[in-house]
Image (cartoon, rainbow, N blue to C red):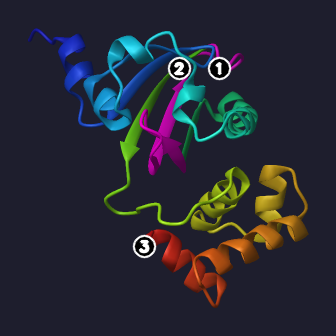
Amino acid sequence: MDVDYRLAFDMAPVGLVLSRNRTMVDCNRHVCEMFGASREVLIGQSFQILYPSADEYERLGAHMEPILNAKGHYADNRIMKRANGEVFWCHVSGRALNRDAPHESGIWSFEDLSSQRPVKAELTGREREVAARLLEGLTSKEIGRALEISHRTVEIYRARLMRKYNASTAADLVHKLLAG
């Protein structure tokens, strides 16, 4: 059986990106549609253009590196940014091709979650990071360790999120984050 791997890559039902040193070296049609940019615009660009802020790009890259190093793969749900500036929830998973240098080369998949989880409130980068980890079921102490901030700082961000989403309890906040 002859398999056309290029066609399979281009037509995959999820966004796929091949990377080197956190730069996109190839991507499929689904990524272009999801982020609202042509292949020509994306190829050769840093993943940073897909993040709401440069700070989030840097922090997440630093967070992912030891996990990729240990496991060879990484996945999470995070807020990403389309070419028109719109932010949306996205499931991102990837595999390092060299665990000793995890950002050297990899393959990444992107799945738009906006139909299940719209972004309704204006959030800061740190609020987005805390919200994503709350949705993973982490405690304030676990979030603090993951983000390298104190659990009291996490609680301040959680309180801000609760105000922005008009949530009365932590469970209510998670429910409202899931609903958008």
Q: Residue at x 55, y 28 (%)?
A: 49
Residue 30, x across and y down, in percent: 28, 31
Measure the alpha-carbon separation of dots 2 and 3.
32 Å
- Mark 1 secondary-structure assignment: loop
- Residue toward you, 64 or 176: 176
Residue 149, x across and y down, in percent: 88, 55
* Mark seen at residue 68: none
Q: Residue type at mark 3?
A: Ala
* Mark seen at residue 103: 1
Mark 3 packing: few (<14 Cα in 10 Å), some, or many (20+)?
A: few
Disc 3: which residue = 179
Mark 2 packing: few (<14 Cα in 10 Å), some, or many (20+)?
A: many
- Residue toward you, 143 or 169: 169
Q: Is residue 34 left or right of residue 64?
A: left
- Residue toward you, 68 or 123: 123
- First in sequence: mark 3 or mark 1? 1
Q: Residue at x 34, y 32 (%)?
A: 36
Residue 19, x across and y down, in percent: 51, 16
Q: Quadrant of the N terminus?
A: top left
